[in-house]
Image (cartoon, grey):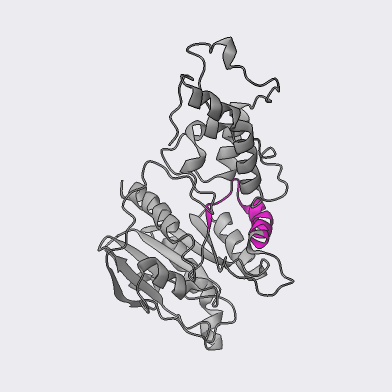
Amino acid sequence: MRVFGVLSSYQDIQSTMLMPARIRLFTHRFSSLLPSSSSSYPPPPPFSLTFRTSLSHSAPPQSHHVSATKTPKISISDSAKFVRTVLFLPPGTDPEEVTEDMILPGSNIVLGPYAGEAKVKEVQFMGSSIRPKDCPKDERPEFAMLGRSNVGKSSLINSLVRKKEVALTSKKPGKTQLINHFLVNRSWYLVDLPGYGFANAPESARMDWSAFTKGYFLNRESLVSILLLVDASVPPQKIDLDCANWIGRNNLPMTIVFTKCDKMKNKMGNRPDENIKSFQELIKESYKIHPPWIMTSSVTGLGRDELLLHMSQLRNYWDN
C-alpha cells in the first residue's frame, strides 16, 4: 500500500512526474470493462486516489516544479463517487483511502480490512438436501454457487479447493439437482446449487427450479453471498440476465463470477472482456452500484486466489 506524505526525496518527485501516465494507464485498463455510459456516476476520472499525496503541511521548494505542463486537478469528491459507484467497497473501507493496489486483479473488488486467511486446507462433502429446510442448521456462513448448467460450476469448485472430483463434473449439463453442501476448513460452506437452463433433468424437476432455489435464497439466514457464475466466452444470455436482475430486485448479496475467461467460442465472437462489459451494461438498472465481479478460469487458475480473498473478507465480516 502506498504511504501518503510530504514529498521529501528525488524519488518522490520522480514518481509524481509519472503520475499522469500511470493514472491514464489504470483508467484505460479498468474502464474498458465498465458499461459505456451511465447516468448514476460521472465518466471515470483519472484515479487520483491511487496517487494522492498530501502537500498541506509544507510547500515544496520551487525547484520541485520540473514540468511546465499543468495537470488538471481532480476533485476528490468526484473520485470518491467513482469509487463508491463502480468499485465494490467491503465494510470498513474508506472510499477516499482506496488505492489501485487494493483492487483485486481482474475485478472491481477492493480488498478491505476484513480480508484474512483464504487458503483452503480441507474440504468435506456434508450431504445433499432436497429442500432448503433440510440444509445444515449449524449456522456456519455459506456461499452459494449458482449458474447455467454448463457454466463450469463444478470445475470452479474443484479449482477453488484444488481437489479433483470434489464436485461432480459431467459432460451432461444439469447433473446437480440437489443442494450440495461442502464444509471448508471446518468453518464455512460452499454450496453447489442446481444449474438452470437446458438441464438434463425430468421436466418436473426443471419446472420446480425457480421455487426450489428462490426459497433457499430468501430464507437462508446463513447465506453470506450468492456467487452467480456467468460464462464470459459467450454474449450475455437472457436467462443469466433474468437471474441477476431478480437477485438485484430482491437486494440479495451477490458476486458475479465470470467463468471461462480464457476462451472464445469462435474466432468471430466477442472477447470475454467485451461480453463482461455488455453484461454489466444490461443489468445496471437493477443495481444502484455495481455488484462485485471477478474474472476466472478453471483451466488457467485465473482469479482463484482473488476470489478466495474476496470470500474471506465477506465471511470475516459476517462472523463479526
Q: Residue furthest bottom?
A: 202
Q: Is residue 287 magenta?
A: yes
| Residue 220 in picture, x, y percent from top left | 39, 62
x 46%, y 42%: residue: 102
Identity of the residue drawn at 56% across and 80% down: 207
Look at the image and give the residue range highlighted in magenta: 274-294
For the question of whether residue 135 can be seen, the reply is no
Residue 72 percent location from the top left of the image: 69, 25
Q: Please say if 169 is above or below 47.
A: below
Query: Which residue is at the front of the view, 69 or 259?
Result: 69
Q: Is residue 87 rendered magenta in the image?
A: no
Q: Quadrant of the N terminus?
A: top left
Quadrant of the frame with the C terminus: top left
Q: Is residue 12 above or below residue 87?
A: above
Residue depicted at x 37% and y 41%: 113
- Residue 230 vs residue 161: left or right? right
Q: Main secondary structure of the magenta part?
A: helix
Q: Position of residue 11 (x, y in %)?
A: 49, 27
**In front: 131, or 125?**
125
Q: Quadrant of residue 128?
A: bottom left
Residue 245 visible to the viewer? yes
In the figure, is residue 121 to the left or right of 294?
Answer: left
**Residue ID at (52%, 46%):** 88
Q: Relative to 279, say whether 174 is above or below.
A: below
- How many numbered discs sit on the rendered protein? 0
Percent from the top left, x then y, of residue 174? 51, 82
